[in-house]
Every structure is written in C-alpha cells, then in structure tokens.
Amino acid sequence: MNEFLLIFGMALVTFIIRYPVLAFLSKMNLPEKYLSGLKFVPPTVLTAIIIPQLLFDKDKLDISFQNPQLIAGVLAALIAWKSKNLLLTIVLGMGIYLGLRWILAI
Amino acid sequence: MSEKNTKQPLTRWVEFFNGAKAIFPLEVGAIPFGIIFGALAVTSGLSPAGTMSMSLFVFAGASQFIAAGLIASGTGIFLIIATTFIVNLRHVLYSATLAPYVKNLPQKWLIPLGFWLTDEAFVVTIQRYQEKDTSPHKHWFFFGAAIFMYINWAAFTFVGIKAGQSIKDPASWGLDFAMIVTFIGMLIPMIKSKSIILAVVSAAVSSVLFNNLPYQMGLFLAAIIGITAGVIGQSIWPSAQEDETNE
C-alpha cells in the first residue's frame, strides 16, 4: 500500500470538509433563521455519536442489564447531570464501565 | 447587558490559556483513544511513520480508527479515502456553525482553525463564542483549545505506536469507551430548553433507526433530523419562554 498517497488523500478530503465552508460562509450575511438553527448542531451530533454506541453491540440492538455500555452510559449521564463536572464524569464513567465488563466476564 | 461589557476585555493570552484549560478534560478522554489508535494502526499493517503522519496530517480520530480497520482488511486506498470523507462529513456542520463567529478573521487564521476543527475543539469553542461578552479575541480561545488537543493526540498516538509493538488486540480492552463517556459529559449540560430536548430525542431515535446505514451515514442523517426538529420546536415554544440563559 502506498501510505503517502493514502494519508495525503485522507488529509485532503478532511480539510476539504472542514475549511471551505468555514471560509465561504464567514464572508456571507446569513439569515437569522439559519443562525438560530445552528445551536442544535453540538447536542444533536453528540447524541447521534453516543446513542448507537450505547445501544448496539456489533450491529445488534442490546437493551439489557448485560450491556455494560448502556448501564455505564446512563450512570455517566446521571453523574454529569448531578455533578456538572466533566473530568469526574469521565473518570467515574470509565471506572464503572471497566468494572461492569470485569463483573460480566466472570 | 451593557453593564457586564464595561469590564476590561480579556487579553489574547488569557483567552488562549482559558481555551487550553477548557479542553483539558476532553484531552483526558482522548488519551486512551489516541493510544488505541496508535497500537491498532501498527498492528493493522500501517508503518509507525505512516501512523504518526496520519495523526499529524489527517487529525480526525474516528476516521483514522476506521481507516486502520480497513487497512487490516485489505481495502484499497480509494475506498479508504472515500470512507474518510463520509465519516468526517459531520464537520461540515461544525464549520457552518462557527462561520458566523469568525467573520472578521483573515485567511491565516481560518486555515489552521479549519484544520484543527475536531469534535472536541468545536464543542468548547462554540460554547465560548456563545457567551454574551464581546471579547475580540475569542479565536485565541479556539487556538489554545485546538493546539493542545492536537499535541495531545499526536503524543498519545506515539505512545500507542510504541505500545502496539508489545500488546495484542488493543481494541479489546474497552478503553475506547472513554470517548463516549467524554461526549456524554459534554452533552448533558447542553440540554437546557424544550427545543433542545426535542432535537436530542429526535436525533437519538433517528440514530437507532439509521444505525445499519454504512460508513456512519446514519450519524449525519440523525443530526440533520435532530436539528430540523429543534428548529420546529423553536417555532412552537418561542425563545422568550425557554430557559437559554448561560448562568
């Protein structure tokens, strides 16, 4: 495999996604309606990344107590909500997840 | 409102260090991901130099991960690049969201900021831009957040490359879940109005329905549906009734 070509191509398409829209839209006057819709981008993208990772195990829906991602994810959400502390959420959430995996593997 | 703005505006370097501070927890969440990527890529057949270059020049975690998997399965270069494009398509939404805030920045800023626009840098930066104060140096916050995310990603890719030569099956340890926990921690505080709840629930349901679409197209579709639902929600519940204040 030609690694140079691969990485050059991946870098190029990624930059083409990130940069031109930033450059061109920043030169335009955008309608108020458009701007008010954009505040939904961060929460919806994050949700769309998170939810399938919690509910699916290799393309199979798994909503049960045997699913450590789901249990740890729900608990992490509760910790985030109560503590409002991101670092604490990450550390506790990961601890719970690894603990559950260990218990379920016994 | 004008009362608050009479304060001295923050200097460039204060913004820079605030950005670096804001992204710190997200870097912690990205550490296992970087290590696993480095380890996985070298065990997939990418050379150590190629693995390092990918983190330095592509700098898009999810797509790098998928690329490593595709290399291992013997997929051709063109298909890997096309997959990268689709997996990273969500970044269009980030650029579109940030664009109105970077109106007055010259190209020498827009090019690096575009290159460094990861999930993490986007989320902390957009929150800074949405704060009400009129600091003229908010792009320095972006710069501070982005450059430390970049250094962190490169450094832990390197650790992963070194570790990958001695550990077997790095993906089986479950450490990649750190990224999801990080995103949960970012998401929860954002949910503070009825229209955002509607947007998030719509995106969640759609992401399950479209999960079987290839190359994470479901992610992109679910986000678009969620945004649309949010805009509709906003017209049902006018913003005056919504609790949108950043307290």
Image: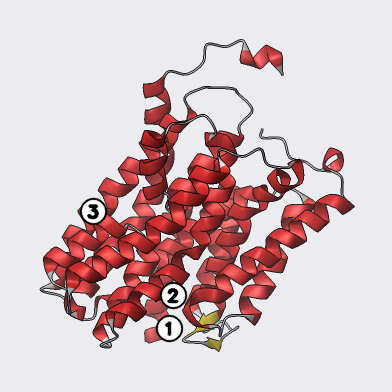
Question: Compared to A68, does B150 lie above or below?
Answer: above
Kind of element beneath mark 2: helix
Callout 3: 10 Å neighbours few (<14), some, many (20+)? many
Q: Which mark is residue B154?
A: 3
Question: Compared to B63, does B80 lie above or below?
Answer: below
Question: Residue A17 at what x, y percent from top left?
Answer: 45, 58
Q: CA distance from mark 1 to mark 3?
A: 34 Å
Q: Amino acid at mark 3?
A: Ala
Q: CA distance from mark 3 to mark 2?
A: 30 Å
Question: Residue A89 at what x, y percent from top left?
Answer: 48, 54
Callout 2: 10 Å neighbours few (<14), some, many (20+)? some
Which residue is label 1 attached to? A104
- The answer, for residue B174, to whether it is visible in the render is no
Kind of element beneath mark 3: helix
Which residue is label 2 attached to? A100
Circles 1 and 2: CB atoms closer than 8 Å: yes
| Residue drawn at x 56%, y 55% as measured from the top left | B93
Camera-side residue of B52 and B247: B52
The subunit carrying tag 3 is B
